[in-house]
């Protein structure tokens, strides 16, 4: 037996549940300029990419996440590395591309 659902009119469409611009996010995508990046050590690019896609809907620009190997320099800044370098860390880099 098929269930019939009643059609109603005059019911307002609710707002989309997105984080407000003042909400602190897990990753620092607000204020990133084109070419800027941040590194998330130990996280897969698939999980980071999905999260960035979801939270960047109300942030201008486009972002790209890639699996990378990074190493810290003497100043504590991350730089690209290879899996064979001593002290490298595997994770995900996120770049603002537009």
Image (spheres, rainbow, N blue to C red):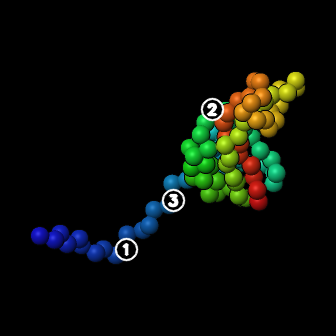
From the viewer's perspective, is the residue at label 1 or at label 3 nearer? 3
Disc 1 crowd, CA 10 A, few/some/many (<14, 14-19, 20+):
few
Disc 2 crowd, CA 10 A, few/some/many (<14, 14-19, 20+):
few
Quick one: SS at disc 2?
Answer: loop
Q: Position of residue 72 (x, y in %)?
A: 80, 28
* As drawn, 17 above or below 1: above
Residue displayed at 69% across by 52% down? 64
Mark 1 vs 2, N-terminal side: 1
Q: Residue furthest left?
A: 1
Which of the numbered marks, if any, corresponds to residue 10?
1
Mark 1 and mark 3: span between their CA atoms? Answer: 18 Å
Specify whether 59 is left or right of 37: left
Specify whether 65 is left or right of 77: left
Q: Position of residue 36 (x, y in %)?
A: 80, 47
Which of the numbered marks, if any, corresponds to residue 42?
2
Residue displayed at 67% across by 43% down? 67
Mark 2 vs 3, N-terminal side: 3
Mark 1 vs 3, N-terminal side: 1
Mark 1 and mark 2: span between their CA atoms? Answer: 49 Å
Residue displayed at 44% across by 67% down? 13
Check the picture and name the quadrant holding the C terminus: bottom right
């Amino acid at each position: 037996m098929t269930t019939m659902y009643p059609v109603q009119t005059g019911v307002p469409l609710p707002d989309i549940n997105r984080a407000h611009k003042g909400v602190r996010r897990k990753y620092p995508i607000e204020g990133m300029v084109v070419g800027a990046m941040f590194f998330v050590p130990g996280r897969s690019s698939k999980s980071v990419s999905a999260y960035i896609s979801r939270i960047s809907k109300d942030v201008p620009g486009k972002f790209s996440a890639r699996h990378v190997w990074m190493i810290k320099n003497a100043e504590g800044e991350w730089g690209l590395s290879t899996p064979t370098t001593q002290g490298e860390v595997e994770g995900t880099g996120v770049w603002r591309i537009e």
